[in-house]
Image (cartoon, rainbow, N blue to C red):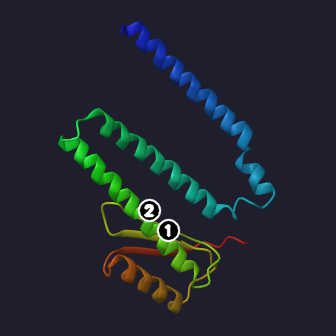
Amino acid sequence: MSNTKKIAIMSTLVLLLAVTAVFNFVLAGTPADAAADGTAQEDYFTSFREERVATRNEEFLQLDSVIAAYAADSAEYTEAVEQKQRMVEVMETELVVETMVKTLGFTDAVVAIGAESDNINIFVNSSELTTENVTQIFSIIEDELGIRNGNIVIMPIYAES
């Protein structure tokens, strides 16, 4: 393929990306619109989940392209498959922990677990956390993940429901 064709294709892709961004902005509305009707704060947990899903979908696409580009017996292929499996395991664990935290009486919660570390961030829908709440959440982390001494952050995010 000639350089002219490559440049034309790349220019077209950039143009399509720009058009998509404009449509996304126009069709989704602006953040000011959401704040005007009081839903901006309420959608924190939904937004967090949507961003997490979008990011992971991009990561899966990248891993799929590596898997497709290399032979099944190559180190790159094996590493991409293993990384994809780790991501699925982390996603499942996050879902379980989120559900368990909600059973403590919180209306909503999101959990973000570091794929390559013991970093765990837990955001709960609450104006404040009691010592009992924190202890119960730490107990869930210890039981589900086996992590006792990690970088665990539990944050209350108050979103009216």
Quarter assignment of residue 147: bottom left
Quarter assignment of residue 42: bottom right
Residue at x 42%, y 41% (from the top left corner)? 61
Callout 2 amino acid: Met
Q: Can you give x and y, in whole percent of width and height, for residue 27 in the image?
A: 73, 39
Q: Can you give x and y, in whole percent of width and height, for residue 129 in the image?
A: 56, 84
Q: Is residue 53 left or right of residue 139?
A: right
Residue behind mark 1: 95
In this rendering, the answer to whether 120 lies above or below 66 is below
Residue found at the very far bottom of the displayed protein: 132
Give the total number of marks visible in the rendering.
2
SS for tag 2?
helix
Residue behind mark 2: 91
Q: Circle 2: is it few (<14), some (14-19), or many (20+) Cα within 10 Å?
A: some
Q: Quadrant of the N terminus?
A: top left
Task: Give the Cα distance between marks 2 and 1.
Answer: 6 Å
Q: Are marks 2 and 1 in contact (CB under 8 Å)?
A: yes
Q: Quadrant of the C terminus?
A: bottom right
Residue found at the very far front of the displayed protein: 72
Q: Circle 1: is it few (<14), some (14-19), or many (20+) Cα within 10 Å?
A: some
Q: Can you give x and y, in whole percent of width and height, for residue 115 in the image?
A: 35, 60
Callout 1 amino acid: Leu
In this rendering, the answer to whether 73 lies above or below 33 is above
